[in-house]
Image (cartoon, helix red, strand yellow):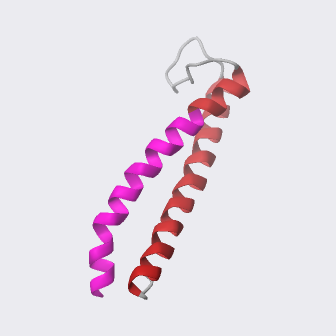
């Protein structure tokens, strides 16, 4: 394994945590716009409909995937600029 890949591992972990926080905040704001409710439903919320539960899960998954891909790609591009080597 290349040294850049090994050195990038902790950076990737930090970027993953940051992307999770960003995605969580973005989802919370998006849910306010979509449903007008501050509290997104959990799968076990008895008083929420299937529609609300599945819509929330789909929106949350899409936002998380886009944010994670954006942050991961940006980290890889920055690593290549700094080291001249792609970390992946």
Q: Is residue 13 left or right of residue 52?
A: left
The magenta stretch is 1-27
Q: Residue at x 64, y 40 (%)?
A: 58
Verify whether residue 62 appears in magenta.
no
**Count of numbered circles in the view:** 0
Residue occupying image coordinates x 60% and y 54% = 66
Q: Residue at x 45, y 81 (%)?
A: 80
Against 83, residue 75 (above or below) is above
> Which is nearer the eye, 70 or 48?
70
Q: Quadrant of residue 35?
A: top right
Residue 88 higher or lower than 35, as above or below: below
Q: Provide residue 56's location: percent of width, then percent of height.
A: 62, 32
Q: In this rendering, does residue 88 appear at all?
A: no
* Chief SS of the magenta region: helix
- Front residue of 42/73: it is 73
Q: Quadrant of the C terminus?
A: bottom left
Q: Is residue 8 magenta?
A: yes
Nearer to us in this view, 55 or 36: 36
Picture coordinates of residue 85, whole percent (x, y)? 42, 87
Q: Is residue 73 visible?
A: yes
Image quadrant of residue 82?
bottom left
78 horizontally vs 28: left or right: left
x%, y% of residue 26? 58, 38
- Could you tell whether 49 is left or right of 42 in the image? right
Query: Where residue 17 sits in the image (x, y, percent)?
Result: 38, 50
Quarter of the image that includes the N terminus: bottom left
Seen as rendered, the residue at the extreme top is 47
| Residue 10 picture quarter | bottom left
Q: Residue at horizontal 58%, vertical 36%?
A: 27
């Amino acid at each position: 394994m290349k040294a850049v890949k090994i050195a990038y591992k902790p950076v990737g972990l930090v970027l993953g945590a940051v992307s999770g926080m960003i995605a969580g905040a973005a989802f919370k704001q998006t849910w306010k716009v979509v449903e007008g409710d501050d509290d997104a439903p959990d799968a076990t919320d008895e008083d929420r409909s299937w529609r609300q539960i599945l819509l929330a899960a789909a929106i949350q998954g899409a936002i998380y995937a886009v944010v994670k891909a954006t942050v991961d790609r940006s980290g890889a591009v920055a690593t290549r600029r700094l080291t001249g080597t792609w970390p992946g």
